[in-house]
Amino acid sequence: MYPSGEIYGGFRSSYDYGPLGSLMLRNVKDAWIRSMVQQRDDVVLIDAAILGAPQVFEASGHLSNFSDPLVDCTVCKRRFREDQLDDRDCPESKAKCVFTAARAFNLMFQTHAGPVEGEGATVYLRPETAQGMFVNFANVLQTSRMKPPFGIAQVGKSFRNEITPGNFIFRTREFEQMELEFFVPPSESAKWYEYWCKTRMQWYIDYGIPAEMLRIREHAKDELSHYSAGTSDIEFLFPWGWGELEGVAQRTDYDLKQHAEHSRQKLEYFDQATNERYVPFVVEPAAGVNRTMAAFLLAAYDEDVVNDEPRTVLRLHPRLAPFQIAVLPLSKKETLMPLAKQIYSMLSTRYMCDFDETQAIGRRYRRQDEIGTPYCVTVDFDSLEDKSVTIRERDTTNQHRVSIDTLLSEFQSILGY
Ligand code: ATP
């Protein structure tokens, strides 16, 4: 990851993801979609617009409520979030900061649509993906045959004009979210809230974060968002302390009711079995893609010793690693290249593969260990005769020989997909 616009000194509130980072970022989102949409018959996916009309955010309460308490230092003129203040010193002097009283600072980015600025042209960049699910609730009900309990999921960019972005990709002004709005009969809200807290916690563990680096923390009443009847944060032990990866919130019927009132549309569910009409309650697991990626990286980072040499290894889950397999011809000699390329073509129909022919084989293994590639396939001179290759495993460094004919099915059985 690089600070965006790095050649101009960097823009610390947003980051660009490079050749490896972008693959891993995509894998995090795919892993979420697989478990939240693909492997469930009660959740559908949408992709809503980033630019939103003021009416949406007026109804949702974001225009009036989505703010952080901002304080200014009257000495060094810097600005801080009041709830994140420690005893601060002014930079380049020994003076202590002196803070003003806090005022509400709205976190939404505002821009204008069309060639004329001014009243009527104002639009907002969404500060969460969730509103896309609420404003499309009726569309989805009409077109999907879903009935509560069911969910609408979305993965995409959100924007918040954070007062103090920082800690690398933990808090930025442009970021991605993975959110599910799960619509339930009102009496089932508490049950589903518990279900989603447990299910989401398990997802992080399944993808390789040790349970002791995770905790779930229930919000105190004065911490709750304007729409929430109860929220728990799933937190990860970052090097700087516990930090939120995901919030699981009981949003009640707040959003659907607000949008129904402001749009004058009916946003409710008619249950033909019981002849009942009701506004569903919503349970929302809302996760950040970038923070989650940082957590997976931190949890996977390891240093060990192999053959008396120290090595750095990223023990990433194979589904999250940028490459699942690296194809390594033992030498650059022309004789090995056609077979190695053929194997690369075969494996890359199913897996993201790297191809590396530079430097000694040991160096190449280390390079793949460092970027988390779980398996290397080495093509050597014997391969030309015995039509077999060596699979080398990242975590154990064990090697075994496999016939090229069965290579794809071998990986299918090792990786499970
Ligand atoms: P925080 O308290 O850290 O500001 P939040 O409670 O406001 O976060 P939510 O509104 O619950 O965050 O958003 C859901 C998720 O979106 C968060 O758990 C986080 O992973 C992610 N997220 C929110 N704001 C940012 C940001 N500025 N940068 C990166 N990720 C973010």
Image: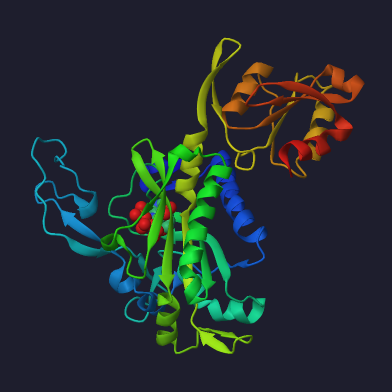
Q: Is residue 327 above or below residue 249?
A: above
Residue 380 in percent (x, y) is at: 80, 19
Q: Residue 126 vs residue 70: left or right?
A: right
Q: Residue at x 9, y 35 (%)?
A: 94
Coloration of the structure image = rainbow
**How many numbered circles does the render carry?**
0
Q: Is residue 22 above or below residue 101?
A: above
- Quarter of the image holding residue 220? bottom left
The residue closer to the viewer here, 336 or 404, is: 404
The residue closer to the viewer here, 144 or 352, is: 144
Q: Residue at x 80, y 35 (%)?
A: 410
Q: Would residue 178 be seen by someone viewing this image from the given angle?
A: no
Residue lying furthest top in this view? 308
Residue 295 in percent (x, y) is at: 47, 41
Residue 95 in percent (x, y) is at: 8, 39
Ligand 1 quadrant? bottom left
Q: Is residue 274 above or below residue 224?
A: below
* Quadrant, the C terminus: top right
